[in-house]
Image: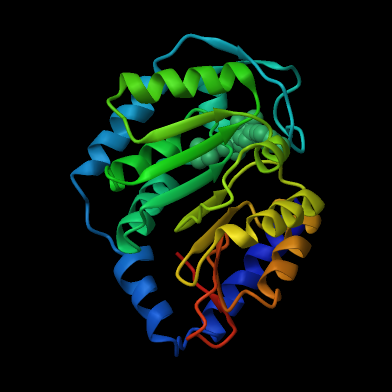
Amino acid sequence: MFHFIFSYFAHLLKSFHLHGIHSPFVFQLEKKCLKDSTTYTDYLKLSQYRNSVNASNKTLHIEDHGAGSRVFKTNDRKVKDILRHNCSTQKDAQMLYRICNYLKVNTVLELGTSLGIATHAMATARPDAIITTVEGSPEVYEYAATALVDNGIENVNCIASTFKEFFDEYDFNEVTYDLIYIDGHHDGTATLNYFEAILDKVHNDSVVVFDDIYWSTDMTAAWNKICAHSKVTASVDCFDIGMVFFRKEQLPERFYIKL
Ligand SMILES: C[S@@+](CC[C@H](N)C(=O)[O-])C[C@H]1O[C@@H](n2cnc3c(N)ncnc32)[C@H](O)[C@@H]1O
C-alpha cells in the first residue's frame, strides 16, 4: 500500500514537472485519445454489458494462475465480486475503447479476459478487428465466452489457456498484433517473461498496454525495465496503465500523463 501511495504522488509530480510533451505523436495521443471527453454512444453498450454481468447471481470457481488475490480468501467467488475487484472499471474500459479507436487497431491480444469487460470494450470499438483473449481459469473463461456472444460480440476469439501454454503451444508465428493488453499475473518476473514472449508479435506501430504497473514494487521494477528495453522507444505512464511503443521514428523517451 505504501508503495502505491508513494508512487501516486511521485507520478503526480512527474506528470506536472515533465508536462511539456515534445513528441507530436504523444501530444496528439494525450489530447485526442487519452483525455478525449466525448461521450461516445457506444459507451452505452459498455454500460449495458457491465450491467448484465453485475446482474448475474452465479458463483465461479477460480483456478489462480496469477499472483493471488489481496481481496478474496476463497476460490469460489460471486461474479458481482469479481466484477468489483478484478475487472476494468467503466472509466478504464472507456479508455481502452478510445485507444483501440484512435490507433485503429485491427488485431488485438489480451492476456487476462476475466469477465470480458475490457474485451467487450475493445471489440465494440473495432467491430471488424479480431480480438484474441486468453484466460486460464476455466469457469471464468466459460462465463466470459458465453456472455460476450450473448451480448452480440462476434469478433472475439476466447482461448482457455494459461499465458505460458498460449505462447508455448499456439501456432501463431506469423501473427503480429496492433495492440497487446497485458492484464493478468501481476508478478514482475512473469510480466517480463510475457513481454519477452510478445516481442516478435509486435511491429513498428504496435502498442503494448500494461495494467497495474504500480501494484507492487516488483511490478514497478518490471515496468521500468520494459521502458528501458532497447526495442521500446516511447513509453507513456498514466499511473493506472502504462503503454509502450516501438516506433523507430520516435526518440526513446518516458512520458508521464495524469488522467
Ligand atoms: C485482472 S483480471 C483481467 C481483467 C480484464 N482484462 C478486464 O479488463 O476486465 C486477470 C485475469 O487473468 C487471469 N490470469 C492471471 N494469470 C494468468 C495466467 N498465468 N494464465 C492465464 N490466465 C491468467 C485471471 O484468472 C484473471 O481472470
Instruction: Point out residue 140 in the picture as x, y percentages from the top left corner.
Output: 57, 21
Q: Is residue 60 above or below residue 141?
A: above
Ligand 1 image position (quadrant): top right
The residue shown at (69%, 33%) is 162
The residue shown at (76%, 33%) is 68
Left or right of 71 in this view: 98: left
Front residue of 115 and 214: 115
Q: Is residue 51 above or below residue 139?
A: below
Q: Is residue 254 above or below residue 216?
A: below
* Colour pattern of the rendering: rainbow
Q: Quadrant of the C terminus?
A: bottom left
Front residue of 112 and 91: 112
Instruction: Point out residue 144 in the picture as x, y percentages from the top left corner.
Output: 47, 24
Instruction: Point out residue 236 in the picture as x, y percentages from the top left corner.
Output: 53, 71
Tell me if residue 79 can be seen: yes
Tell me if residue 86 can be seen: no
The residue shown at (35%, 22%) is 149
Left or right of 208 in this view: 61: right
Instruction: Point out residue 226 in the picture as x, y percentages from the top left corner.
Output: 69, 67
Q: Is residue 92 above or below residue 236?
A: above
- Which corner quadrant of the image does residue 228 belong to? bottom right
The residue shown at (59%, 16%) is 139
Q: How many dots with numbers? A: 0
